[in-house]
Image: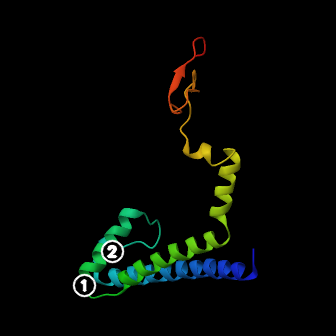
Amino acid sequence: MTTARVIIGILALGCESACGIASSLVSFEMVERVNERLPKDQQFAPLWWYWSKNLRLWREYKALYPDGSLLRNLRALGVLIFVCLFTGVWDFGFFAVTLLYTLLLCDGADEIFTPAKPAGYERSSLPGISLARHYQPGIL
C-alpha cells in the first residue's frame, strides 16, 4: 500500500468522524430550536433517541421552520459520512481483501458463480451436453 493511499484513507476516516460530530451538533441545535417553540409536555428529551423520535423531530422542525437549513445540513452531513466511510474502507483495501478471501475460500472464481450441485448428481460427459446432469443410483 502506498503512502498516498494511507494518507487518503486516514483523511477519509477523519472526515467521516468530523462529519459525525458536526451532525450531532446540528441535531442538538435542531432540538433546542424546536423545544423553544413547543409546549413543555411535548418537548424533546436530550437522551434516548430512536428512529421514530428522529422522524418526529424532523417533522416538527420542518413545520416550525419551513425555510430552516438545519435539516438540509443534517442530510448533507449524512451523505458525506457515508461517502467518506466508503472511501476510507475502499482505500484501505477492505473490498479487495474480502474478494481475495472469497476467492481463496471458494478455491477459485468458478465456484462463486456456479450453483451448488445437488447430492447424487454429476455433470454429463456427453459432448455438447455439458450442463446435463444424470442421476447416479445408490447415492442419495
Q: Which amino acid type is shown beneath numbered disc 1?
A: Pro
The residue singled out by tag 1 in the image is: 66
The residue nearer to you, when weighing 106 against 62, is 106
Q: Which mark is residue 112?
A: none
Q: Quadrant of the C terminus?
A: top right
Up/down of 73 relative to 113, above or below? below
Mark 2, Cα crowd under 10 Å, few <14 / some 14-19 / many 20+, is some
Percent across and percent down for residue 75 are: 40, 78
Q: Which amino acid type is shown beneath numbered disc 2?
A: Trp
Mark 1, Cα crowd under 10 Å, few <14 / some 14-19 / many 20+, is few
- Mark 2 and mark 1 lie on one chain; the one further toward the N terminus is 2
Q: CA distance from mark 2 to mark 1?
A: 11 Å
Q: Which mark is residue 58?
A: 2
- The structure residue drawn at horizontal position 38% and vertical position 69%, both measured from the top left corner, is 54
| Numbered disc total | 2
Q: Find numbered disc 1 in the image and state the secondary structure of the residue it sits on.
A: loop
- Classify residue 72 by image quadrant: bottom left
The residue nearer to you, when weighing 50 against 80, is 80
The residue nearer to you, when weighing 27 against 43, is 27
